[in-house]
Image (spheres, grey):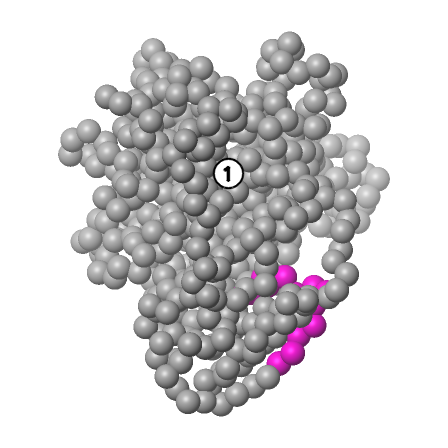
Amino acid sequence: MNEDQPSVENGCVLWSNGMDLFKDAAERNNFLPTGLEGIDMLLGGGLRKGHLTEITGQSSSGKTQVCLYSASHVAARHMGVVLYLDTSNSFSPSRIAHIVDELPISLIKEPKDMRLKRVMSSIVCESVFDVFALFEVLDQLEASMNDKVNSGGNKICLLIIDSVSSLLAPIIGGKNSQGRSMMISVAMILKKLADKHNLSVLVTNHTVGGNGAPKPALGESWKAVPHVRLMISRDHGSNMYTATVLKHTLLVF
Amino acid sequence: MSDIFWFNFFWLGKSAIPGSAVAPQSSCPRLLEHRRRPQAPRVPAVPPSSSVISLEIRQTAKGPPVRADEIALGGRRISRLPLSGRRLELRTNFWSLTVKVIESANKLKGAEEPSGVLRGAQNAWDLLSDEQSQKHITTGSGDLNSILGGGIHCKEVTEIGGVPGVGKTQLGIQLAINVQIPVEYGGLGGKAVYIDTEGSFMVERVYQIAEGCISDIMEYFPYRHDKASSGREHLQPERFLADIYYFRVCSYTEQIAVINYLEKFLGEHKDVRIIIIDSVTFHFRQDFDDLALRTRVLSGLSLKLMKLSKTYNVATQHQGHAGKTKYFCGR
């Protein structure tokens, strides 16, 4: 064997047994609240750390609003830094300011303008417009998170990609399968980041299909990727939002 | 942004970055094939004290299918390799280039602000202050301005849709003129790029609108232009026409080519503040049989436009027709 190949022992991941995992899950605060009670209830407490959650829905059904609410609430409760990857220029700082101002005062005890500045400084936003840029960003993120493990800075706890389907939809389809392989690469990297650094990842997806009921985009291969899938829809007449769970690893139906 | 070489690197050997267990990609056929070549460079043994990353860099063709292959096999682009503070040793070989990146012994340990988590990212507080200081391009109509929140925003893509004859092209021309209103009269003082796919850009009409705009400025700011008498010479319709860059596209391939070229164009002409595309779906309606391909191409175009808007601080406005595909781009 070449000496440059890592030996098998070093390549192994640490074991843990089921009891340890269960105790760990019971003790630690594993859920990041989104701030919207209905969605939190459906998710079983909030966005779970180490899991990939997907919100899907038609255009203007409220997906970006869910993302903005999650970002504001997580940042406001000192849970860590939120990284918002924005693919359609839909990140609106004034909307975040509006949400933070409306938070109940009992939740946080500090003057309003200081709170606003602190909360907004812990939301980091980056625009990505194609899948290659997304790979770069995720690589940089992984490298910097590896460094942060050692230096112990302010860690990212929530990664939001709004929307991952607008990056992936133009490349899948057609005769070549490279687009799909890139999509699965993205999925693997996101899940690895979530698991290794205990992040919660929230992505949004749009819907396709005019024949019957709209179904989530990105096809069959993406169906298995997120741990939890929610579909939201909006009834324009009554201004009511409906959320449906499509897939959940914890809840049983 | 345009890489001349597409570098593809595989992590060969033990990576010295702590905490990462990188499995060897021995199942990767390309790697195996490379290892079978006798002249392939041997990766040196990693000394434990210094952190050495050995990267194998290969030059491959730039096309996206090849790139996609490489990424699928685990390669990564190193156009933004964090090389600051590291020594680069280049060792060339017949087949490829080996770059040894040796990190400097003293790592920078500055204050870790959240934006340090990602190079080039801004936090929401900075974005808020940017947003509040953004200027808008007035559409000329008070009601439209109030719906849009002050006017057309820069760094955003706005879509205007409607039945034929409702006034979309006229609005586009009006915006091309309004963006040029000088800064002292409350405008942006920028230039416009007009991409015309249907041939509906009538120069005589532009001249009329420019004259109308100038007389409006004179009316609203009667005292100002007396102060700067040199400013009066600048307010000529010919100047307004001269500051519109006009592209005529006759097929969808030309349209895609123009949008790809715009990045370079905007890099050279930094004072362009609006791009108007009239209309973005025209060429995609007749020639395209494959609907799925059309949706993909249009989504790709919209992503490129959004990237242009964000990077060069321009407003992009495109027009569609009612009853087109469900594709919707930005705000």
Q: Quadrant of residue B248?
A: bottom left
Residue B168 seen from this side: no
Residue A68 seen from this side: yes
Q: Quadrant of residue B161?
A: top left
Count of numbered circles in the view? 1
Name the residue at 37% across, 26% down: A61
Vertical arrangement, residue A41 with respect to residue B323, above or below? above
Vertical arrangement, residue A105 with respect to residue B254, above or below? above
Asked if residue B120 lies left or right of residue B228, the reply is: left
Residue A117: x, y in percent? Answer: 71, 28
**Amino acid type at image mark 1:** Asn
**Pointer 1 residue:** A198
Asked if residue B307 lies left or right of residue B242, the reply is: left
Residue placed most toward the observer, A96 or B301: A96
Q: Which residues are magenta?
A: B78-90
Name the residue at 38% across, 54% down: A185
- Callout 1: chain: A
Q: Quadrant of residue B82?
A: bottom right
Residue A186: x, y in percent? Answer: 40, 50
Name the residue at 73% across, 66% down: B104
Q: Main secondary structure of the magenta part?
A: loop
On-image quarter of the N terminus of chain B: bottom right
Name the residue at 33% across, 18% down: A242
